[in-house]
Image (cartoon, rainbow, N blue to C red):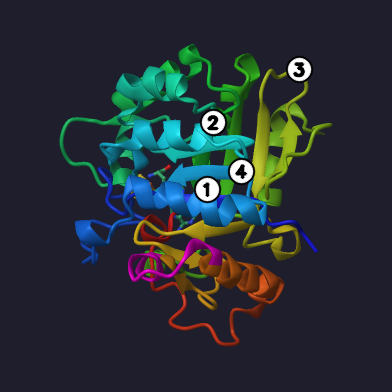
Amino acid sequence: MNRVDYLRISLIDRCNFRCHYCMPEDAELDYIRSPEVLTRTELQTLVSEVFAPLGFRRFRLTGGEPLLRSDVTEIVRDLAALPETEDLAMTTNGFLLASKAEELYEAGLRRVNISLDSLNAETFDKIIGNRGRSRWQQTWEGILAAYRVGFDPLKINVVVIPGVNDREVLELAALTLDRAWHVRFIEFMPIGNSELFGDRAWISSEELRDRIRQRWGLETASVTGAGPADIFTIPGAKGTLGFISQMSECFCDRCNRMRLSADGWLRPCLLNEMGQMDLKTALRSGVSTSQLRDRVAELLALKPEINYKQRESGTTGAYSRTMSQIGG
Ligand code: SAM
Ligand code: SF4
């Protein structure tokens, strides 16, 4: 059985973007009320007294948009200082990164994944639901700032949507030619905006690799990441290409993670809603952290049975939460 040692922590369910596939502008989202959001102290307690003792060693801060949280730097500092933390990373849309990159690095963050679905400002604004002044340039500056400050590896996440940004796959892959960046193509998932999810809403990683192979050739990288991505390189390129193929290839058997939502729900599988556990209410009603540890340990034992493959059995209202609410 896989060792589950990786916790994705959503700091907030709100966002300054309204990506069409995640939080479409016209969707009525039920935001978590601020008193329901885990505080910095509660997060620290859960990580240090529940998750770390159970063997969790790697943590990723996500959201919503984690940089909207005013105490994000302090949370980074807390988690980076835990002796058990072996890896601390963040997934962000990058819009506020230029002004925060340095203080986050100084607080102990070493890795960032930045979402950038397009190199074309117009397409980008359309995807993120922006109608005002373009937000592309500031996002790009966030990426450059993170690179300058020394985040390594610096990963760019691209969700590929047919007819929207798939024409740019070669251009996005070319970002790895001269820079040691990791560009990762993610198959679009039927979470959140399910209306977008027609018969042909996602393109397989294999198809993307074929396009890249025809242009430059493609080699399997010698190092495979610990996560779900299959890693390749364009011959001679400084960076790598990752493919996350949760739709075309099931990787439940190598799943090593759980997710904690901003309101303290622990979720064993992204695509199956079984087994979720409300840690915040338990903590606030006085359940001790040693009891919480026992409950999470029981859930860990069940995790191999709770996965995408098993989603038909017992799933309650599948996909009712968007990625921004779950913590993608
Ligand atoms: N706001 C941050 C960001 O966009 O990077 C962090 C949270 S966002 C939910 C995390 C990742 O989930 C992003 O890379 C986003 O593109 C991806 N995502 C959101 N909805 C998705 C979907 N339906 N299918 C695949 N990826 C999705
Ligand atoms: Fe916000 Fe990230 Fe969702 Fe886009 S993908 S709406 S940036 S949480």
Position of 41 with respect to 83 (left or right) is: left
Crowd rating for badge 1 (residues with CA inside 10 Å; few <14, some 14–19, many 20+): many
The residue under label 1 is which amino acid type? Answer: Ser
Q: CA distance from mark 4 to mark 1?
A: 12 Å
Q: Residues within 10 Å of mark 4 (few under 14, many from 20)?
A: some
Vertical side of 116 occupied by 248: above or below: below
What residue type is disc 2 on? Leu
Residue tagged by mark 2? 172
- Labels 3 and 1 touching (C-beta < 8 A): no
Q: Is residue 91 above or below residue 137?
A: below
Depth check, front residue: 235 or 145: 145
Q: Quadrant of residue 94?
A: top left
Mark 1 or mark 2, which is nearer the start of the sequence?
1
Task: Report the disc number at residue 58.
Answer: 4
In the rendered structure, which amino acid carries the disc numbered 3?
Gly
Residue 48's label in the rendered image is 1
Residue 57 location, quadrant: top right
Q: Residues within 10 Å of mark 3 (few under 14, many from 20)?
A: few
Q: From this viewpoint, which residue is outermost toward the right?
A: 222
Give the CA separation, mark 4 to mark 2: 28 Å
* Mark 2 crowd level (few <14, some 14–19, many ≥20, 10 Å Cα): many
Q: Which label lies toward us, 4 or 1?
A: 1
Residue depicted at x 60% and y 70%: 294
Q: Which residues are magenta?
A: 280-290
Q: CA distance from mark 3 to mark 1?
A: 43 Å
SS of the residue at dot 2? helix
**Left or right for 84, reference 80:** right
Is residue 251 depicted above or below 291 in this figure?
above
